[in-house]
Amino acid sequence: MSNAPATAKQIILKTPPEIEIMQRANQIVAGALNMLREKAIVGISTSQLDVWAEEYARQHDAVPAFKGYHGFPGSLCVSLNEQVVHGIPSPKVFLAEGDIVSIDFGVCYKGFYGDAAATFAIGKIDTKKADLLKVTRESLYKGIAQARVGNRIDDIAVAVQTHVEQHGYSVVKQFVGHGIGTSLHEGPEVPNYSSDNKSTPRIMAGMVLAIEPMVNLGTYEVKVLKDGWTVVTRDKSPSAHFEHSVAVTESGPLILSDGIR
């Protein structure tokens, strides 16, 4: 679940045993997303996806992280087409041929959080949407590659933004990635765009970062709907969202939610 930029939160470094627990939490998330990819077909309601996700979490001794978070009503964020993030599951919204759907899921397991997201194609999608998904996913891995000891958070942001803009797309600036641990949102913020302030935090071993490019086919500008949650592109162009939780180790980035197909 993305974070709106706000006051700085504390950066909390994790021990190797804590990272092991977080890896298990994130593998539950990855398993749920793989299950949902198979079940997300034409005619399924977004609320049905939500039910399946919660059942999966509880079957694996975890609890949904988003449900009730600041009043959010669902276990999943399900965002269709021009919806960027934080779409609310609904029994009245059904997946249709040609849709793209961003599914963002988080769990709490043994006191630690896991968080990841992917955007899926429903049936056959047009080439513009397909390329948007490809570039957004690639930009996530470009960012992850910079999550190394001694780099700065801005190095992640530059890598994502450069790849996205080289392909003619735009990165969302109103919402960012974040640290994660015993809280769903910890420091530091992880933007997908470079700020003028290059003195962003140094990346240290023990950081766990939720890196999550949100990429629009058109303008980067977004707005929040009247429900107080759902974020959409201002120009109604499609948007894609991919996210992994990544631990920083002395030997490089470790993708805790690896395995999402």
Image: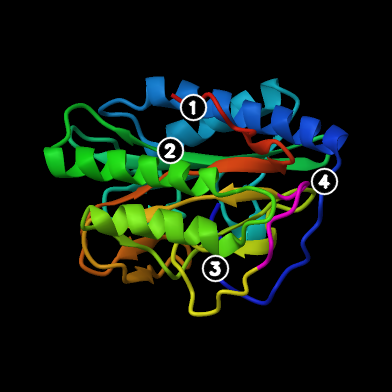
Check contact, mark 3 vs mark 4: CB within 8 A: no
**Which residue is found at the position 42% from the left and 60% from the top?**
230
Helix, strand or loop at label 2? It is strand
Range of residues picked out in magenta: 201-207
Q: Nearer the viewer, residue 106 or 191?
A: 191
Q: Give the number of the disc on residue 118.
A: 2
Residue that numbered label 4 is attached to: 14
Residue that numbered label 1 is attached to: 260
Check contact, mark 2 vs mark 1: CB within 8 A: yes
Q: Disc 4 or 2, which lies upstream in sequence? A: 4
Instruction: Locate residue 144, reporting x and y percent.
Output: 53, 44
CA gap, disc 4 and disc 2: 25 Å
User: Badge 3: how crowded within 10 Å, few (<14), some, or many (20+)?
Assistant: some
In this rendering, the answer to whether 253 lies above or below 124 is: below
User: Badge 2: how crowded within 10 Å, few (<14), some, or many (20+)?
Assistant: many
Check contact, mark 2 vs mark 3: CB within 8 A: no
Q: Is residue 74 left or right of residue 247?
A: left
Check contact, mark 4 vs mark 2: CB within 8 A: no
CA gap, disc 2 and disc 1: 8 Å
Of tags 1 and 3, which is closer to the observer?
Answer: 1
Whether 36 is among the magenta residues is: no
Of tags 1 and 4, which is closer to the observer?
Answer: 4
Task: State whether the magenta stretch is mostly helix, strand or loop.
Answer: loop
Q: Amino acid at mark 4?
A: Lys
Q: Is residue 212 visible?
A: yes
CA gap, disc 1 and disc 4: 23 Å
Residue that numbered label 3 is attached to: 4
**Which residue is found at the position 61% from the left and 42% from the top?**
245
